[in-house]
């Protein structure tokens, strides 16, 4: 019965505060806890997105380096074999249809 009485008093007190224009200075602990949890989760997501973005940036740089190495190797293959059209699976050289090769022996 005391709990019911407290709820009625709490409700009445709230109503009086509303009528007299008294505003609360803080949110209740339940609302504060929910807000802190949500903001914490948002911050964790931002942190993870930042980590993923940095990793992505790093991989893009690594990819550019690998592509540069492939370009240099293709130039070396053209010099050595006259073409850079090579089957990556078995190493077979695919010479141009006209048979012309720019190979200098």
Image (spheres, rainbow, N blue to C red):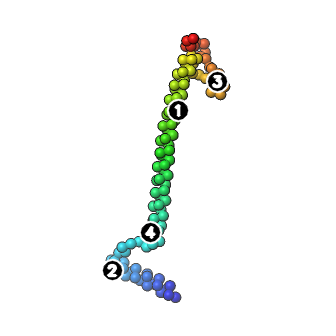
The residue to which callout 3 is attached is: 91
Q: Report the Cα–Cα distance between label 3 and label 1.
A: 20 Å
Q: Earlier in the sequence, mark 2 or mark 4?
A: 2
Q: Earlier in the sequence, mark 3 or mark 4?
A: 4
The residue to which callout 4 is attached is: 32
Foreground: disc 2 or disc 4: 4
- Residue lying at the far right of the rendered structure: 90
Secondary structure type for disc 4: helix
Q: Position of residue 45 (x, y in %)?
A: 49, 54
Q: Position of residue 14 (x, y in %)?
A: 40, 79
The residue to which callout 2 is attached is: 20
Secondary structure type for disc 2: helix
Foreground: disc 3 or disc 4: 3
Q: Report the Cα–Cα distance between label 3 and label 4.
A: 66 Å
Q: Earlier in the sequence, mark 3 or mark 1?
A: 1
Q: Report the Cα–Cα distance between label 1 and label 4.
A: 51 Å
Q: Residue at x 60, y 13 (%)?
A: 99
Q: Residue at x 47, y 71 (%)?
A: 30
Q: Earlier in the sequence, mark 1 or mark 4?
A: 4
- Is 94 situated left or right of 64 in this image? right
Do tag 3 and tag 1 residues touch (Cβ < 8 Å)?
no
């Amino acid at each position: 019965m005391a709990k019911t009485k407290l709820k009625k008093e709490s409700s009445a007190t709230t109503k009086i505060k509303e009528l007299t224009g008294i505003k609360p200075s803080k949110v209740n602990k339940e609302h504060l806890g929910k807000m802190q949890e949500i903001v914490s989760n948002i911050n964790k997501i931002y942190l993870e997105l930042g980590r993923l973005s940095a990793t992505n940036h790093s991989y893009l740089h690594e990819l550019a380096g690998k592509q540069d190495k492939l370009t240099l190797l293709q130039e070396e293959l053209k010099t050595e074999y006259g073409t850079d059209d090579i089957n990556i699976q078995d190493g077979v050289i695919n010479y141009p249809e006209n048979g012309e090769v720019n190979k200098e022996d």
